[in-house]
Image: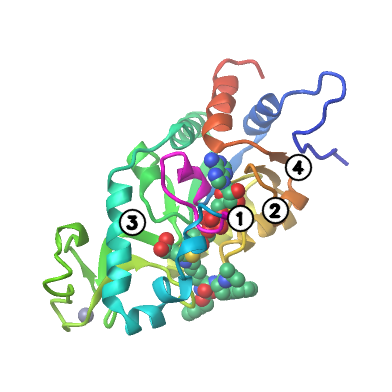
């Protein structure tokens, strides 16, 4: 059985994690990249569960990210999303996002299957230029009706919430961000594709996610059960660390560009 690489092995001249990951990429036929809030942290967007800096350390998820919270105080929820939307609009993709664009280009030009599945709602993968992106928790730039689900083309950042709350043109219901809150189902078609890709990939990158939120958190475990190699990139350990062939205890914006350099330099 292959030994596990935790990034802390200091024995004689171990192969660097960068080269090892690059080798895994070259050997794979089908690569799935799964990202969470950590990949956008270096763009200045707060994560959720990190002590001190995570959003849930300051804000109550039941009040701000649940249908019940919205029903109780839609102004408060929309104001919070407007604040986050403005933060995201003023953010740029970081070297981690850009490296994943390069990884996609490398995979597609070498005939490998590639998909990027993200839990993030910030759209930064697409802004960076990734094209095979599946958003599991929606997108903060879209609004939809909380009553009839009709998509709206109204832009929340142009709306003055103190004047009135945005409403559906069809049923007059309140508009809300098109994101997945606690207790809500994920977009079914995307989830189906995600299950299928996780079950069939041979290399799975789990990047910047605590893997605590279901059902998305089951994807890496499904992939490992079906025989995929798991590379986790996260400064902290998570439930996935135990089943990963490699846990890279580094920032994604540092490690991923180095890995791409190794792939492109033909060192491996
Ligand atoms: C770095 C880094 C750097 C930092 N580089 N790394 C089974 C068991 C238990 C509970 C449940 C269950 N099934 C369902 C539930 C309930 C619930 C759930 O999972 N709760 C748990 C928290 C206990 N799940 C749900 O409610 C889901 N719905 C559902 O299942 O409904 C059932 C249903 C089915 C059919 C019909 C109807 C209903 C929905 C979950 C929706 C989650 N929504 C949110 C908010 C989205 C909108 C918004 O952004 O406002 O999604 S919550 C939040 O968590 C957000 C994220 O996408 C998600 C995951 O967070 P993520 O990305 O992992 O972030 P963090 O902060 O947790 O971790 C960041 C990591 O990055 C850390 O590890 C850092 O170390 C690392 N990091 N800097 C690399 N530079
Ligand atoms: Zn409506």
- The part of the image, by quadrant, that contains residue 134 is bottom left
Let me know if residue 139 is in the magenta part: no
Main secondary structure along the magenta-highlighted residues: loop
The residue pinned by badge 3 equals 84
Residue under the image location 72 percent in, 24 percent down: 16
Residue at numbered disc 4: 245
- For label 2, the residue is 240
Calculate the distance from the C-alpha at mark 3 to the C-alpha at mark 1.
20 Å
For the N terminus, which image quadrant? top right
| Residue 31 drawn at (x, y percent) | 58, 42
| Disc 3 versus disc 4: nearer the observer | 3
Callout in the foreground (2, 1): 1
Q: Residues within 10 Å of mark 4 (few under 14, many from 20)?
A: some
Point out the stretch of residues depicted in magenta. 37-51
- Is ligand 1 less than 8 Å from the beta carbon at label 1? yes
Q: How crowded is mark 2: few (under 14 residues within 10 Å), some or many (20 or more)?
A: many
The spot of residue 164 in percent (x, y) is 13, 74
Q: Real-space Cα distance between discs 2 and 1?
A: 8 Å
In terms of sequence position, does the residue under pointer 3 or pointer 4 come before the other? 3
Quick check: 191 left or right of 212? left
Mark 3 vs mark 2: which is more N-terminal? 3
């Amino acid at each position: 059985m292959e030994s596990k690489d935790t990034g802390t092995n200091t024995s004689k001249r171990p192969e660097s994690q960068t080269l090892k990951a690059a080798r895994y990429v070259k050997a794979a036929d089908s690569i799935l990249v799964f990202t969470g809030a950590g990949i956008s942290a270096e763009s200045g967007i707060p994560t959720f569960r990190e002590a001190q800096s995570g959003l849930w350390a300051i804000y109550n998820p039941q009040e701000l990210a649940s249908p019940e919270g919205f029903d109780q105080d839609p102004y408060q929820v929309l104001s919070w999303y407007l604040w986050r939307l403005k933060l995201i609009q003023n953010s740029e993709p970081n070297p981690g996002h850009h490296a994943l664009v390069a990884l996609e280009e490398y995979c597609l030009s070498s005939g490998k299957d590639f998909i990027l599945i993200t839990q993030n709602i910030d759209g930064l993968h697409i802004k960076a230029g990734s094209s095979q992106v599946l958003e599991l928790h929606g997108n903060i730039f879209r609004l939809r009706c909380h009553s009839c689900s009709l998509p709206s083309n109204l832009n929340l950042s142009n709306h003055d919430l103190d004047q009135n709350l945005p409403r559906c043109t069809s049923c007059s219901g309140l508009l809300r961000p098109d994101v997945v809150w606690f207790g809500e189902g994920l977009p079914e078609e995307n989830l189906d594709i995600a299950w299928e890709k996780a079950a069939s990939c041979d290399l799975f990158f789990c990047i910047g996610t605590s893997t605590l939120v279901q059902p998305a958190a089951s994807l890496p475990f499904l992939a490992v059960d079906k025989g995929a190699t798991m590379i986790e990139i996260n400064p902290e350990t998570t439930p996935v660390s135990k089943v990963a062939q490699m846990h890279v205890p580094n920032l994604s914006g540092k490690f991923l560009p180095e890995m791409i350099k190794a792939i492109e330099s033909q060192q491996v």
